[in-house]
Image: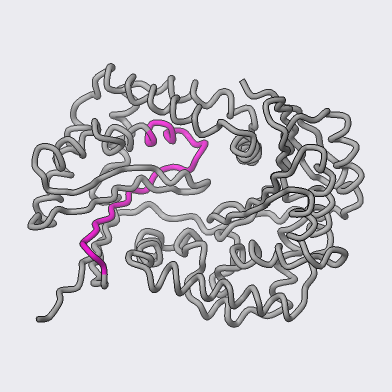
């Protein structure tokens, strides 16, 4: 049981505090309700660019990392299609240093042409190294626009292309900050061996004077129901072929999400999963195969990732995958199989939420989803899933007309 307290400042900042007596460290986790889905189609990659700009210093503190390191702390951040998350880990006695740093960059990020150019160059290089020059790096750049027609999930967090970052202007950057980086669009989670009243005092001291802003109403284009099988084949300089399948499904928190998550586990989680046993152990058609859900806030995807064995054909693999899918739709999963999968989920969840940092991030994310207490109750939602529910949602999700397939073929060496 993860115990926590909630409070909110007058400027709209939501704060969660978790007392953890097992660690000498404290975590300051700041989640902003902005991700790649909030970008203009003509200026993608901005949320990720801001992840970098936020470390470029604020008006009052030109060097963010220096004071944090002097206080014995470390920091990092990540961006997704739905959120941007920043965290600092410091000795508990130096909590105020982290709050000072985080509040100042929320209030007054330093916008200089030099900082923009430096971070622009860093992001462009990252785009090249991780997405263009790395084997399979452009998988999501290719898959997303194939799977999504209208929703902003159709571009990756890094952006559609380098030009959007190259052409970003200072005015556009400032506007993005003003729109999304303010107390009313943030959730602050503090955890450690601390006292609630002291946390309230320090948060009020450093954050209460940051002006409130009206939270932008999110009005994203909704993805229409997919009605046809989509497939695309590309050739790349990669060691071997990779087949990717995606099935549209509900967003996290919607009815059917937990059923879909367990369907993916039955299909392709671990060596006892149906796809692994049939395609790898029995038929030796693949070297690896797994399934998972993306956990998106809006229309998500249930994914299959397939690494074919030498000599195995797409037709052979495709046939066996659809056979197993048809079995799931026509025959109820055994109660024992479902129970085993749910127990695995519970174990994984318990392990993933060990440590004060992981608990802080989970609390903030669950608060954004509507209930921070999901950290304690989510396993009950998995336990409520029935074999009938699995079959119902398997029939709904695992349809050929709801499937997007990307085939990456290894280029043949001409000798």
Q: What residue span does the magenta drawing correspond to?
A: 238-261
Which residue is painted at 90% across and 37% down in the image?
201
Q: Where is residue 328 drawn, in percent x and y?
A: 22, 32
Foreground: 352 or 301? 352
- In the rendered image, the residue lying farthest to the top is 336
Foreground: 278 or 374? 278
Q: How is the image coloured?
A: one colour
Q: Where is residue 87 drawn, in percent x and y?
A: 67, 48
Foreground: 312 or 180? 312
316 relative to 331 in the view: left or right: left
What is the total number of numbered labels drawn onto the structure image? 0
Foreground: 74 or 18? 74
Q: Where is residue 339 drawn, in percent x and y?
A: 34, 19
Of the 4 image quadrants, the one containing the N terminus is top right
Residue 228 in sight in this render: no
Residue 271 in sight in this render: yes
Q: Is residue 293 above or below residue 64?
A: above
């Amino acid at each position: 049981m993860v115990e926590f307290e909630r409070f909110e400042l007058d400027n709209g900042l939501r704060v969660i505090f978790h007392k953890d007596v097992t660690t000498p460290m404290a975590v300051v986790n700041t989640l902003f309700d902005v991700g790649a889905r909030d970008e203009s189609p003509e200026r993608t990659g901005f949320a990720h660019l801001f992840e970098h700009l936020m470390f470029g210093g604020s008006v009052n503190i030109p060097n963010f990392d220096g004071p944090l390191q002097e206080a014995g702390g470390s920091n990092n951040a990540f961006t997704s299609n739905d959120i941007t998350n920043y965290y600092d880990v410091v000795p508990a006695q130096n909590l105020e240093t982290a709050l000072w740093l985080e509040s100042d960059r929320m209030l007054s990020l330093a916008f200089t042409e030099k900082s923009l150019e430096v971070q622009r160059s860093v992001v462009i290089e990252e785009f090249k190294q991780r997405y263009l020059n790395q084997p399979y790096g452009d998988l999501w750049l290719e898959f997303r626009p194939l799977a999504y027609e209208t929703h902003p999930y159709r571009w990756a967090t890094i952006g559609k292309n380098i030009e959007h970052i190259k052409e970003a202007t200072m005015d556009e950057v400032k506007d993005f900050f003003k729109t999304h980086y303010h107390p009313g669009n943030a959730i602050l989670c503090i955890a450690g061996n601390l006292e609630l009243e002291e946390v309230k005092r320090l948060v009020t001291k450093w954050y209460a004077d940051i002006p409130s802003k009206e939270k932008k109403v999110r009005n994203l284009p909704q993805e229409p129901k997919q009605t046809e099988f989509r497939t695309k084949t590309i050739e790349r300089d990669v060691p071997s072929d990779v087949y990717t399948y995606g099935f549209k499904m509900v967003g996290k928190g919607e009815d059917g999400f937990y059923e879909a998550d367990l369907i993916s586990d039955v299909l392709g989680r671990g060596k006892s999963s149906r796809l692994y046993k049939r395609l790898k152990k029995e038929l030796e058609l693949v070297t690896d195969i797994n399934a998972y859900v993306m956990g998106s806030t809006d229309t998500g995807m249930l994914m299959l990732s397939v690494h074919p064995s030498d000599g195995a054909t797409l037709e052979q693999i495709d046939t066996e995958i659809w056979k197993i899918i048809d079995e799931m739709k026509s025959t109820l999963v055994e109660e024992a199989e479902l129970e085993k999968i749910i127990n695995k989920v519970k174990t994984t969840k318990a392990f993933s939420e060990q440590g004060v940092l992981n608990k802080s991030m989970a609390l903030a994310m669950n608060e954004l989803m509507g209930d921070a207490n999901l950290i304690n109750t989510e396993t009950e939602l998995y336990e409520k899933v029935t074999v009938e529910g699995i079959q119902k949602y398997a029939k709904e999700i695992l349809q050929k007309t709801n499937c997007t397939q990307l085939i990456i073929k290894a280029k043949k060496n001409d000798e």
